[in-house]
Image: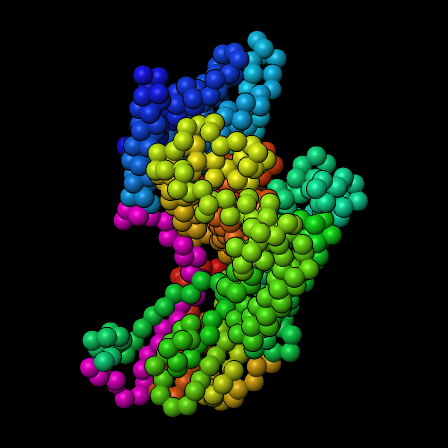
């Protein structure tokens, strides 16, 4: 039933999109169809290879979301010619081919390699994150006030793809030494906290507060699970709360959003805040116009949001596709996170923390994007998983799902 | 007509997406096909009551506690004590007891945070700075409860 409903919805979405969005030539339509055939062929092969029926559940959801990514990308009408009979494809198509490659590579690596006891690997990953951040600061160019890239790849993607490995190295360390006594924090937990704060400081240097938020939330949850001392947890939480309060007061775009939320009526009347208030609270002011069935693909103009296909793709889905589809997509995304939280029994603690970190990052990215689109004080800049345009981020998310699939396969192999 | 055709495809996408969502939800929650999140059990703790049996109405009906229980432990740290909010709750009478049990693959360590216990006729008092290594088949006596640790069979 899953395979049949997925296939029908995939090709029906293709027909709906290409009928709604008229292009100058048929080349983009052909390009869209070809990539869809490649994607669905891969999904079908996975269906037959996955005998345990555990991997397919999440990968099908990922593919379903990817279909909407292809559709939204086609909607934007920004095509690139790939020189293959002059074929024109959307940027997302090229990202999708890379995503398929990354998925297979990461899956096979995690499944077959036993790196949980390899200290060189662990140390290398731990070192790589600060190096990436410092490298971005030193070598990158400022884009909209932030240093976003390192060696042409978004820092957000690199750091979040590798952070689960670094975090699980700390989390799975044996507790043998403590600060003062076992009642207080162990040295490996203190090391994790110091490392996290180092990464936070790096994010502030880069002006990348979206990355800081995701790292902060993930680290905090991991720390709360691992640390046993309530006093330490309380002090840490107060410190994080204080940092968040400072951010809301000192960082202008966060402060603006907080002020808009505290008094929306006066914000609209304010000369400086008025334009920001319109985009922040767009959904609440215009939701009645969207209707249950959508206004048609291509309806929402770019004048409202420059980022119709990335940070604000959820509003595009609600306005153009339909609120019903947006609700189903959110429902499936929650199921995806639920699926990512479960692994087979009997895995090493390193792999269980690795899986948990991957699932937490996915969950928080989803949560922040939804909150941002709903107009909360949480800043935008984080796209919807697999639907938003953004090669580095989609590759990072694909690698997180591939890690989870690799751990499922590893658990099944161990059981055999 | 053109618009109506578009609407038909839209409805088809929404309808099949709904079926897909429900199918996925059922697949994730179906019994017998679910993933278990527990880790690899490396040690077992067996707890026996050596004092007066407590077979009260509440114990039997609501908690179902017997006079002997066995629990498998994964790698990690646990609070063992006689309060319900402790990770491993032992129904020991007397004053408050709180132990910090550090389970590793091939070792186990115990620290006494509150109360006093007896290990092989040696009495230990609360000292959070001290870690007591526990060899296999260690017997720990906590008032009217005896706790025994042993490694999982076949575990190195």
Q: Residue at x 42, y 72 (%)?
A: B87
Q: Along the line of sight, which residue is nearer the eye, A122 or B138?
A: A122
The image position of residue A339, as x and y in percent, is 40, 46
Question: Which secondary structure class fits the magenta region best?
Answer: loop
Q: Quadrant of the N terminus of chain A?
A: top left
On the question of residue A109 being in view, the answer is no
Pick the quarter of the image with the C terminus of chain A.
Answer: top left
**Residue B130 in picture, x, y percent from top left:** 59, 81
As drawn, A91 above or below A400 = above
Q: Is residue A340 above or below residue A50?
A: below
Of residue B42 and residue A407, the one placed in the foreground of this image is A407
- Examine the structure image and report whether residue A16 is included in the region drawn in magenta: no
Residue A169: % across, % down: 60, 55
Q: Quadrant of residue B6?
A: top left
**Image point (32%, 44%), residue name:** B25
Q: Which residue, as the protein is rendered here, is positioned at the far top?
A: A85
Magenta stretch? B29-57
Residue lying at 40% horizontally and 75% vertically, measured from the top left: B85
- Farthest residue in the right direction? A138
State the scheme by which the image is colored.
rainbow
Say whether residue B111 is visible: yes
Q: Nearer the viewer, residue A314 or A320?
A: A320
Based on the picture, tell me whether residue B47 belongs to the magenta stretch.
Answer: yes
In the rendered image, residue B109, in percent from the top left (x then y), is placed at 52, 73
In terms of depth relative to the viewer, which is nearer, A233 or A16?
A: A16
């Amino acid at each position: 039933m899953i395979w049949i409903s997925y296939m029908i919805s995939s090709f029906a979405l293709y027909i709906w999109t290409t009928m709604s969005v008229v292009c100058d030539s048929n080349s983009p339509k052909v390009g869209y169809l070809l990539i869809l055939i490649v994607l669905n062929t891969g999904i079908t092969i996975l269906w037959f290879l996955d005998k345990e029926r555990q991997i397919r559940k999440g990968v099908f959801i990922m593919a379903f979301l990817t279909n909407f990514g292809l559709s939204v990308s086609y909607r934007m009408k920004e095509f690139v010619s790939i020189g293959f009979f002059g074929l024109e494809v959307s940027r997302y198509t090229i990202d999708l081919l890379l995503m398929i490659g990354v998925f297979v590579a990461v899956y096979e690596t995690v499944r077959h390699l036993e790196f949980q006891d390899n200290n060189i690997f662990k140390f290398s990953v731990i070192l790589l994150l600060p190096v990436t951040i410092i490298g971005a600061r030193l070598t990158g160019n400022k884009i909209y006030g932030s240093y976003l890239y390192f060696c042409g790849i978004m820092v957000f993607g690199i750091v979040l793809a590798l952070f689960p490995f670094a975090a699980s190295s700390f989390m799975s360390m044996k507790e043998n030494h403590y600060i003062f006594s076992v009642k207080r924090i162990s040295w490996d937990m203190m090391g994790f906290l110091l490392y996290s704060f180092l990464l936070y400081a790096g994010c502030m240097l880069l002006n990348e507060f979206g990355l800081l938020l995701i790292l902060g939330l993930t680290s905090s949850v991991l720390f709360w699970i691992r640390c046993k001392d309530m006093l330490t947890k309380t002090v840490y939480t107060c410190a994080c709360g204080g940092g968040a309060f400072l951010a809301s007061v000192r960082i202008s775009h966060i402060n603006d959003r907080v002020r808009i939320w505290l008094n929306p009526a006066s914000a609209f009347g304010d000369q400086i805040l008025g334009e920001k208030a319109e985009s922040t609270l767009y959904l609440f002011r215009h939701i009645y116009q969207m209707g249950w069935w959508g206004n048609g693909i291509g309806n929402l103009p770019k004048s409202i949001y420059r980022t119709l296909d990335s940070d604000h793709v959820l509003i595009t889905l609600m306005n153009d596709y339909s609120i019903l589809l947006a609700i189903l997509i959110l429902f499936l995304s929650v199921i995806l996170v639920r699926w990512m939280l479960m692994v087979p029994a009997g895995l090493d603690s390193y792999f269980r923390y690795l899986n948990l970190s991957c699932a937490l990052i996915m969950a928080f990215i989803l949560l922040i994007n939804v909150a941002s689109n709903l107009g909360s004080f949480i800043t935008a800049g984080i796209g919807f998983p697999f639907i938003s345009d953004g090669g580095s981020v989609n590759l990072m998310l694909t690698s997180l799902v591939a890690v989870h699939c690799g751990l499922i396969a590893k658990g099944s192999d161990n059981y055999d | 007509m053109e618009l109506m055709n578009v609407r038909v495809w839209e409805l088809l996408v929404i309808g099949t997406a709904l079926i897909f969502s429900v199918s996925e939800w059922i697949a994730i929650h179906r019994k017998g096909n679910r993933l278990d999140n527990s880790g690899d059990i490396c040690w077992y703790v067996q707890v026996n009551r050596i004092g007066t049996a407590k077979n009260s109405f509440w114990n039997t009906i609501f908690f179902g506690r017997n006079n002997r229980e066995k629990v498998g432990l994964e790698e990690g740290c646990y609070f063992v004590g006689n309060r319900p909010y402790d990770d491993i709750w032992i129904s020991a009478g007397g004053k408050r007891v709180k132990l910090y049990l550090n389970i590793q693959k091939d070792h186990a360590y115990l620290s006494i945070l509150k109360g006093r216990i007896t290990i092989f006729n040696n009495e230990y008092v609360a000292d959070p700075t001290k870690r007591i290594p526990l060899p296999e088949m260690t017997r720990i006596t906590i008032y009217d409860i005896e706790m025994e640790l042993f490694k999982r069979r076949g575990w190195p």
